[in-house]
Structures are given as C-alpha cells and as structure tokens.
Image: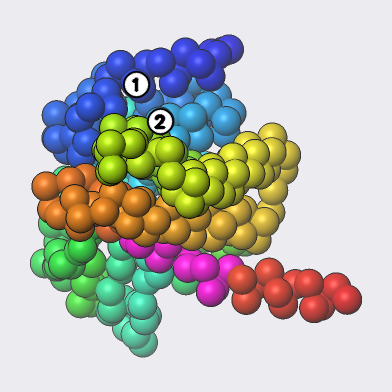
Amino acid sequence: MTIELSELSDAVQKAFPASKLKPSRDENWQLITEMGWLMLDLPEDLGGLGLKRDAVATIHHELGRVLPAAPLIPALLGLQGIAASATLTGKTNWVERICGGEYVPLHMLPAAVEKHDDGRYHGRIAGVFEGDMARHILAGLGDFYVLIPLDGPEITLHEQSLWDESRRLFDVELTGYQIDPSLVVAEGPAVQALQDNLAISAQLALSADSLGAAGALLDMTIEYLKMRKQFDRPLAMFQALKHRVADLKVRLVAAEALFWSRIAGDPTPLEIGAVKAHATSLFRDIAEESIQLHGGIGLTEEHPCHLFFKRAFLNCQLCGNEDYWEEKTGRLVLDAS
C-alpha cells in the first residue's frame, strides 16, 4: 500500500489541531484507533497497512506538536513485539484486539526484576505509560519477552509522580509472578533480535515526537516575538533576539535532516540511540530558550511553554538518556581506533 507522507501529515493536523494542546487521552485514543494508526507498520498478512518507518515517524512528528496524552508510542511498540512473535498462543487474536483499541504497551524504562529459585519473578517494571488503561503489558524479563496480565494477585500497579502533565507513568510490581507459557512472546535467541528491533522503533518514535514538539514551540516563540512590542517595536526586530532564534532554527533543521536520513537507511540501535539523544537534548534546549524569549509570561502556568519544557525533560530520560548514549557511542569510537 502506498500513502503519501503529506496525506498522513494532513490527517493528523485535522484530527489534532495545533490550537488544542494536550488533547484528552481517552477521546483521542478512540480517534487514533478509528484512524487506523495502530495498523501503520503492521505486516499486511496480519491485517495491517505494512507501511515503512517514515510513515510511522510522520505520525509521531505531527502528534508531537500537540503534546498528546494518548499513548500511541508504547502501544505501537507492544503491537510490534506481538506481531513478531513465533511463540505467542493466539497471536492473530491478540493483533485484532489491539488494532480494535485494546491497549497493550511496552514499558519505556528498564525493568529491575529477579527470578527466584522457585521460578517466580520479583521486582519492578518501570515506565508503563497510562498503565491504568492496560489489562496486559509486554515486558522484557531477561531471557523472555512476555505478556503480563495486570489483574493477578501478584501484580500491583503504582503511579509515579510526574512533572510532565501530558502523560501518566506507572510501575508494575511483581511479587511472585510466574510466567504463563502461552503468553511468551520471545525466548532464547529471539529475545535479542526483538529487543534490537524494538529499541530502534522506540528511539525513532521519541526522536520524531521531540522534533515535532520542538518545531511547534519554536514557531510559537517566533510568533510571540513578532507580536510583542517593546519601545514601540516588535521584539523580532531586535538583532540579539533574531540571532538566538536563528541559531535554534539552524540546529532544528539540521537535526531533522539527520533524523530523516537515518530513517531512510538501515540504522543500528546505537546509531538511532545517538540520534534520539541529539533530538531530545535539542528539544530541551529549545524549550529552555523559548521560556526566556517569552520573558515573564513564559514563566507562568497559564502559558503553554512549561508543558513543552516538562515533556522535553522526560523524553530525554526515556530509553537511555544523553549520557548513556554518548558513553556507548564514545566506547564504540575508541574500540574502532
């Protein structure tokens, strides 16, 4: 199936207009389901659209501009893991349920889980976005990727306090959980292959979300500088402010060019991790600069600057922060020298 990326962009912009930041979670989850975005990169033999990474990235980029609460990123990652499974019982049924709106997310932060001598698991699985929406999650437990039902007596859901008001984050605590063999998604050698594929998709999604949000915030800041006057002149006419905005725009355009070029190739998890670190740190820098460029109003809760600022800092921490990816990249360069 061939779909123009411009058509996808237009569809997202119409469904999620830029004038409505932080749209309602439950209403827009239903809208996302009805639009078929859960099926974007699902293989056609499983009933999906079979689109490439650039189509998925376009959706995430446009949604990033409005700071959505609906958890499309973890949902697509969970579906990707299930679709790739060679062991999951009733895989086709799982795929149909998820495409119909059932939320089965992948966790976006590391799990600290131990397997005891009796074969039961204890510990915490961190980074489950909108965990109150889910009945199952897809989790990596060392030698396995497995679907975990959240209604068992040995499962407890803990909501974590977040600075980012556009999302809710939960930990899943396991106290003696025993894996159901019928819910195993990957085991043995398949675990690493699945982990690499999910890592690439996660980094691409976070990069696209961050670059879309950064672009929207920078556009908002430029419009404010054109409108706000000081000494009877728009702030946009002051050379010092022009240079600051121009520097940010150059960095954003360069980061977007790097991002889209990597999508077109066959990146490794490390290469995409480095792109994600660059995109999220740039989003953070633009958020910080935008608050300053807005002056006093940028520091208020009534203005949306703080929403972008908080989202930027959380994106920086998800799936490996900047320090983690810089160290990994540096070690690779040293090993090759």
Q: Is residue 231 left or right of residue 73?
A: left
- Say which amino acid is labelled 1: Gln
Q: Which residue is mark 2?
A: 62
Residue 213's x, y, as percent? 38, 42
Q: Is residue 336 left or right of residue 283?
A: right
Q: Residue placed farthest to the right in the image?
A: 337
Residue 319's x, y, as percent? 45, 62
Is residue 323 on the magenta stretch?
A: yes
| Residue 243 drawn above or below residue 169 | above
Disc 2 and disc 1 in contact, CB within 8 angstroms = yes
Residue nearer the viewer, 40 or 137: 40
Residue 138's x, y, as percent? 35, 54
Magenta highlight range: 313-325
Whether residue 260 is visible here, answered yes or no, is: yes
Q: Which residue is mark 1?
A: 13
Give the structural element (helix, strand or loop) at label 2: helix
Residue nearer the viewer, 147 or 16: 16
